[in-house]
Image (cartoon, coloured by chain):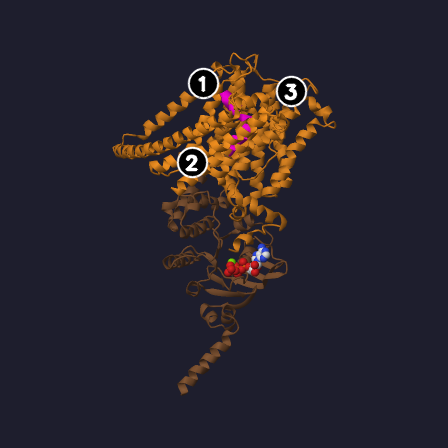
Chain colours: A orange, B brown
């Protein structure tokens, strides 16, 4: 009973803090708007200054449900009375805290205090909405009621769910027994499986071919961006995910690729007018050379040092591009316009052509990454990631393999940069802010270091979703942060191979491999 | 005369003020089991680290079949034919047993990254040979059933054996084992002992061993070298080492001599009365 109440209080406290935070940054009304969108509810009532309260109530109910859900621990299955207590304590505590916050803020608001001086998102209209356009005391009572009721519902629902999964597991085991039995009878022949796979591949191929044709240029734009980020993710994954080198300035290679392509094909400022496909090749090559330039001196560094140095490199490239010094070469902050576009069957590339090309490249990239991963080369990389010192003592020339990873990663970035510039018909220094590196790194990390399907998923979540939910775009950083925190809790080892960064410090100071003894002495 | 597998001359290694290995001469004959023993902190692991290239000794020479290897990077030394295990197990944790052994074969293979994308004949041949040899080694060390399990999830004894399998994968001429039976029970220790013998007798390998379990050391060593405070204090066959006064002192402290004498006197007194 005591643990039940404790768990409930903890869950209540956590949701209350999160919810208060969301109020302060103005996220609650955004969420309410999104809910309105999804449900097709009107955004604005006849009276222009008032927003529909129902959407906000639904959001509060959802948070309440969440409170109830987390009052039960994973895998536990407490008795019903316990569940009742958990749900109630969690909901009441969360409701009390949030209610109090609303009451205090609301009272000040009623007395005419303007919060916008401190918190830009707490304007009068926002506060009115949070108070349901009624009095502070009535509003806080509503919060308390909603949190309590829905937390209770959440807890009970979770309990019901666990019972259902228990039932499902039983069903599953029966089913697997049946499958075992049928396997023995050779119902699944190998040929059948292969046929099935081939059919699936063809179907997916046809789907991928026709999708860009039917879903329109808006979707082609969004999905094209996602595809470019998948390519970037695949490249950085070779460096960070496979070989375990935390390179933070990855955007530098993207930028060199884009600028090389733009300068070789745009009429301004140089009017080189190179063949487009040659230009693509050259852009990739220049990015590879940049990688070599960067890699040779710094890949002897380990862990934190490598991260910091490469972080600087990404910024240096951007600053150089827009500097007065290089303006004659790069067109400075204005960027390069009218970047060349390939011709296909007598027509300039359309959005559909770009999408098809990008899809092909993504497939090729996946293919290459997969084959590399399962080879002698990939094994050497992963060994370096797991324990660089031991990998080298096992016969892997770690320096060579780290440089190889960097060059291949740079090639991916250079290629995507060229396509990016060509598709947008423009490239400017601000396309290559630090955020691009962070974005790509997040894709790799959230996907789970070194996992290829994870990258695709990560690119969709981090680049696709924000584009689709425009209103969320301002909260992208928040989402990053939240995702990273969740990742740290759920898959800490996926975040960053800890041994590397810890050992790195020793190694850089003591000449060669001096950190070995630190570990040896256990 | 046949060249020794390893010959160290005057090897010295120090950390700051501490001389961990002090002018050590060591000769390891071919197809032998040589052991290094000594109290904790005697410098045994440091000597291993010098031989395998982790440290560059500040003085002295190390020859491998007559070839100078001091200062070579560790992967070059591995390519020449020296493999090692670690006192505290250091496997590639997230890789499976099989993959660990495959990485071990890295220096014996030469397929390039482009080939792995194209999967040409050379690449496929090498991969399938590597796979076959990896399974052979896993079988040899009794790890066949654990081939697809990540190293991290293996039981302790299996991890020790997997380290040996990985070291053997490069087909070394010399195997350095740093306390291979540490933390093992009696049966596992016995298995490990016979395994090391098999390596010498059937695989014609040379084994250099650091070991704390005296029964194991005395049982299988051809030559034993004793280190204390970084210095070599004795060397010889097991029987010679067992009766060496300096060795006993190093292990039990200098007082032991007097205690034994007193003890003996008492015994004789008792016998008299
Ligand atoms: N990298 C290092 N930096 C500083 N001191 C070190 C380093 N490596 C070893 N030492 C010191 O050198 C001495 C010898 O250490 P070493 O690990 O070689 O002993 P050992 O004989 O292997 O002992 P054990 O039986 O405990 O494994 C110890 O005093 C140790 O603290
Ligand atoms: Mg040691």
Disc 2, disc 3: CB below 8 Å?
A: no
The magenta-colored residue range is A17-34
Which residue is drawn at the image coordinates 57% and 20% (left, top)?
A125
Q: Nearer the viewer, residue A162 or A488?
A: A162
Q: Residues within 10 Å of mark 1 (few under 14, many from 20)?
A: few
| A260 versus B47 height, above or below | above
Circle 3 SS class: helix
Graded by Cα atoms within 10 Å as few (under 14), some (14 to 19) or many (20 or more), the crowding at tag 2 reads: many
Task: Point out residue B217 in the picture as x, y percentages from the top left corner.
Answer: 44, 63
Residue A348 sits in quarter: top right
The secondary structure that most of the magenta stretch takes on is: helix
Q: Residue furthest bottom?
A: B273
Is residue B118 visible to the viewer in this orientation of the structure? no
Q: Which residue is mark 3?
A: A265
Q: Seen in the image, is A252 located left or right of residue A452?
A: right
Q: Label 1, secondary structure: give it.
A: helix
Q: Which residue is mark 1?
A: A39
Distance of label 1 from label 2 (alpha carbons) = 31 Å
**Helix, strand or loop at disc 2?**
helix
Disc 3 residue lies near ligand 1 with CB under 8 A: no
Decide which of tag 3 and tag 1 comes sooner along the chain: 1
Ligand 1 positioned in quadrant: bottom right
Label of residue A89 in the image = 2
Q: Mark 2 and mark 3, same subunit?
A: yes
What chain does badge 1 belong to?
A: A
Nearer the viewer's eye, disc 3 or disc 1? 1
Q: Position of residue B56 (x, y in %)?
A: 60, 55
Give whichever of discs 1 and 2 has the lower sequence position: 1
- Dot placed on the residue nearer the N-terminal end, 2 or 3: 2
Chain letter of disc 3 in the image: A
Residue at the image point whose x is 43% and y is 37% from the top: A8
């Amino acid at each position: 009973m005591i643990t039940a109440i404790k768990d409930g209080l903890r869950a209540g406290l956590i949701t209350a803090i999160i919810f208060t935070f969301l109020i302060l940054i103005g996220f609650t009304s955004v969420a309410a708007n999104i809910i309105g969108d999804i449900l097709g509810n009107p955004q604005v009532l006849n009276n222009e200054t008032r927003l529909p309260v129902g959407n906000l109530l639904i959001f509060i109910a959802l948070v309440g449900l969440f409170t109830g859900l987390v009052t039960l621990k994973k895998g536990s299955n407490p008795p019903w009375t316990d569940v009742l207590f958990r749900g109630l304590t969690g909901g009441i505590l969360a409701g009390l805290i949030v209610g109090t916050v609303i009451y205090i803020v609301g009272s000040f608001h009623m007395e005419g205090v303007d919060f916008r001086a401190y918190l830009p998102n707490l304007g009068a209209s926002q506060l009115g909405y949070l108070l349901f356009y009624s009095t502070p005391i009535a509003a806080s009572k509503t919060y308390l009621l909603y949190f309590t009721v829905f937390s209770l519902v959440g807890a009970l629902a979770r309990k019901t769910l666990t019972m259902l999964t228990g039932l499902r597991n039983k069903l599953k085991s029966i089913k697997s027994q049946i499958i075992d039995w049928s396997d023995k009878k050779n119902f699944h022949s190998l040929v059948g499986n292969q046929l099935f796979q081939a059919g699936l591949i063809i179907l997916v191929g046809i789907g991928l071919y026709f999708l860009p044709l039917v879903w329109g240029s808006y979707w082609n734009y969004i999905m094209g961006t996602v595809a470019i980020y998948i390519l970037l993710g695949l490249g950085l994954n070779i460096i960070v995910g496979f070989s375990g080198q935390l390179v933070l300035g990855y955007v530098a290679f993207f930028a060199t690729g884009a600028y090389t392509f733009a300068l070789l094909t745009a009429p301004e400022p140089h009017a080189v007018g190179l063949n487009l496909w040659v230009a693509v090749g050259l852009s990739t090559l220049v990015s590879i050379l940049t990688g070599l330039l960067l890699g040779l001196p710094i890949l002897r560094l380990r862990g934190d040092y490598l991260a910091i140095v490469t972080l600087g490199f990404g910024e240096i490239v951007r600053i150089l591009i827009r500097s007065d010094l290089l303006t004659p070469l790069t067109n400075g902050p204005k960027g390069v316009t009218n970047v060349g576009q390939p011709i296909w069957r007598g027509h300039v590339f359309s959005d559909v052509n770009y999408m098809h090309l990008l899809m092909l490249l993504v497939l090729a990239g996946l293919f290459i990454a997969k084959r590399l991963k399962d080879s002698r080369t990939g094994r050497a990389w992963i060994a370096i990631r797991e324990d660089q010192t031991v990998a080298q003592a096992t016969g892997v020339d770690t320096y060579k393999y780290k440089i190889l990873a960097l060059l291949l990663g740079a090639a991916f970035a250079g290629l995507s940069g060229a396509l990016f510039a060509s598709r947008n018909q423009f490239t400017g220094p601000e396309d290559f802010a630090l955020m691009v590196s962070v974005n790509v790194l997040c894709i790799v990390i959230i996907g789970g270091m070194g996992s290829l399907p994870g990258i695709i998923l990560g690119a969709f979540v981090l680049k696709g979703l924000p584009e689709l939910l425009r209103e969320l775009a301002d909260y992208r950083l928040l989402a990053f942060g939240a995702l990273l925190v969740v990742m740290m809790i759920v898959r800490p080892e996926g975040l960053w191979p800890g041994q590397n960064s810890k050992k790195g410090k020793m190694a850089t100071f003591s000449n060669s491999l001096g950190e070995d003894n630190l570990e040896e002495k256990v | 005369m046949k060249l020794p597998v390893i010959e160290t001359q005057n090897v010295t290694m120090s950390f700051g003020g501490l001389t961990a290995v002090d002018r050590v001469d060591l000769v390891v004959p071919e197809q032998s089991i040589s052991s290094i023993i000594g109290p904790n902190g005697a410098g045994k692991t440091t000597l291993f680290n010098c031989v395998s290239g982790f440290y560059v000794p500040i003085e002295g020479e190390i020859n491998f079949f007559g070839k100078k290897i001091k200062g070579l990077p560790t992967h070059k030394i591995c390519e020449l034919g020296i493999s090692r295990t670690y006192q505290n197990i250091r496997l590639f944790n997230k890789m499976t047993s099989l993959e660990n052994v495959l990485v071990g074969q890295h220096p014996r293979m030469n397929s390039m990254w482009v080939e792995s994308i194209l999967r040409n004949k050379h690449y496929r041949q090498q991969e399938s040979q590597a796979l076959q040899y990896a399974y052979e080694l896993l079988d040899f060390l009794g790890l066949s059933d654990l081939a697809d399990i990540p190293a991290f999830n293996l039981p302790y004894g299996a991890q020790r054996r997997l380290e040996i399998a990985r070291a053997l994968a490069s087909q070394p001429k010399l195997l350095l084992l740093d306390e291979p039976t540490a933390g093992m029970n009696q049966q596992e220790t016995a298995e490990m002992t016979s395994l090391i013998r098999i390596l010498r007798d059937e695989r014609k390998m040379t084994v250099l061993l650091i070991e704390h379990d005296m029964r194991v050391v005395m049982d299988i060593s051809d030559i034993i070298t004793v280190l204390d405070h970084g210095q070599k204090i004795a060397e010889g066959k097991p029987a010679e080492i067992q009766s060496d006064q300096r060795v006993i002192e190093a292990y039990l402290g200098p007082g032991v001599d007097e205690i034994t004498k007193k003890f003996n006197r008492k015994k004789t007194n008792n016998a008299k009365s």
